[in-house]
Image: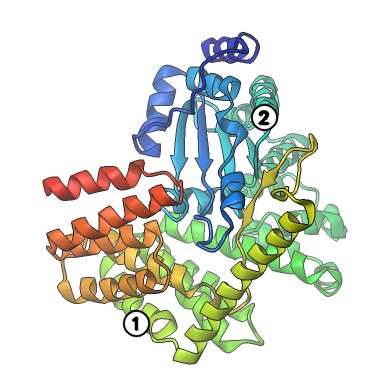
Amino acid sequence: MKYCLLLCLAFFCVAPGVRAQSVRFEKDSLAQIFAKARQQNKPVFVLLALPPAPANLPDALKKSRNTSGLNAPAVASALNKGFLSKELAFGSRESAAVVRQYTVSQWPTYLYFAPDGSLLFRRSGNTDAGQRYLQDLAAFQQAQADPANLSRLQEEFKKGNRSTEFLRRYIAKRRQLGQLVETTLLEAYVQELPVKTLNQGAEVLFILENGPVMGSKAQQLTRLNMKVYDSLYRTLPLAKRVAINRAIISNTMAQAIATKDRALATKAADFARASWNTNYQRGMVAYEGNMLQFYRSTKDTAAYLRSAVSFYERTYYNMPADSVKKALAAMQASRQEQAANRQRLVQAAGKPPRAPSDSSGRVTTMARAVGTGGASASFLQELNNGAWSIYQTGTRNSQYLVRAMQWSKRTVDLDPTSYHYDTLAHLLYRLRFFSEAEAMQQQAVAVARREKAATGMYEQELQKIQKRTL
């Protein structure tokens, strides 16, 4: 294929003295890029960028954090010639959708897609070694040529292959790439199983790990032998049980949304609440959060707005002052501890410390999604998400918009990041406070630039605000 040839040329024909260049990222939306990729028969590279660096991080560490082998001449050349590339800023709207779809929990994450939109390879963690990224590109090429890659497995499934061995391979490939297993696929798999295999704990566990939809044949068959089922839940580690429950909830909610089945959504939300049987408050947050997802995804705007305002006000905006203070103190202490530990390493070694290294011994930087088990731990992120979701409904109701603006202002006051400023700017614009919106969007651009984060999206939105075309 054309893009394979270009990639090979980029690997082997870049001269040592080639002028430095950086990866050329597309400005179109991800949906537009995938459409263009199909037309041009080009693969797509998506970078989910690191979150902004803590303000108190030493300059030497900030520099190390922002140094990436991704911009090595050979790597940038290969990506620019052979791929359509898109960078998604941490916390952005498009980023949030990709994080959900591909279960991303580490940043930066790199996703490599075939021209048809099938995910073929992924990697997490930043390194200053360009060779690592060349190896990733080679791994993508191998996956593209693999007769058992996800794209080909999907095509074979569409053609009607339903052998147990094939379906198991297809399911395993989706899980390997961090994607939830579709209901139709899991149902097709259990349809082919001999009943006697459901007396085997390993087979029941395999089905459970892939998140059978509540009420589906797959879920019912896992309970065919209750002794086996109960034994699994008694003996499995807590982390494994939690992962199974999450998969069941996610797949059930996805099915409810696809079919606009409110009763099924309520079942999933009830199951989520019951999984917090020792913590009533967390259980209610889980229930309401799932129902909000259902209303938003099925475009039941009236139900969503009514429920969302009550939920975000009660759960996050009106958190007791002592809880807010503790959450902010814990966040700041964690940042200071990390910076202090790294600084001690600087002083001990007489040079900037190296972050964890990959197999080549080069610096690797990675951020992970962290939760402490309480609503207060992530209340700023949740408030920002809530404010943005109100904006996304398209409502012109000033009462809802003012509430959302207040939530957004709280996030900016407590944690002035580029994406918090961006949300506030959009809400101010919707309320027709144009000059204030422009000022906030300028802050979003300035903060992103200062953090050495992607600024393209914020600059585009600023231009729209200035032209009154947002």
Q: Secondary structure at mark 2?
A: helix
Q: Position of residue 263 (x, y in %)?
A: 45, 71
Q: Position of residue 260 (x, y in %)?
A: 39, 60
Alpha carbon distance from label 1 to label 2: 46 Å
Q: Is residue 384 above or below residue 462?
A: below
Residue carrying label 1: 310
Residue 245 vs residue 63: left or right?
A: right
Do the residues bearing badges 1 and 2 touch, measured as CB atoms within 8 Å? Answer: no
How crowded is the residue under tag 2: few (<14 C-alpha within 10 Å), some, or many (20+)?
Answer: some
Q: Is residue 159 above or below residue 288?
A: above
Q: Position of residue 5 (x, y in %)?
A: 58, 9
Give the mark nearer the N terminus: 1 vs 2. 2
Q: Tell me which residue sits at (42%, 44%) in the image.
A: 454
Is residue 175 or residue 428 the one in the foreground? 428
Is residue 86 or residue 12 the one in the foreground? 12
Name which residue type carries label 1: Ser
Q: Tell me which residue sits at (66%, 69%) in the image.
A: 337
Name which residue type carries label 2: Asp
Is residue 346 or residue 140 the one in the foreground? 346
> For residue 315, which quarter of the picture?
bottom left
Q: Position of residue 459 (x, y in %)?
A: 29, 44
Residue 62 vs residue 221: left or right?
A: left
Q: Secondary structure at mark 1?
A: helix
Total of numbered circles in the picture? Answer: 2
How crowded is the residue under tag 1: few (<14 C-alpha within 10 Å), some, or many (20+)?
Answer: few
Residue carrying label 2: 136
Q: Answer whether residue 409 is visible to the viewer in this image.
A: yes
Disc ID at residue 127: none
Q: Answer whether residue 270 is visible to the viewer in this image.
A: no
Residue 142 vs residue 17: left or right?
A: right
Q: Is residue 158 above or below residue 294?
A: above
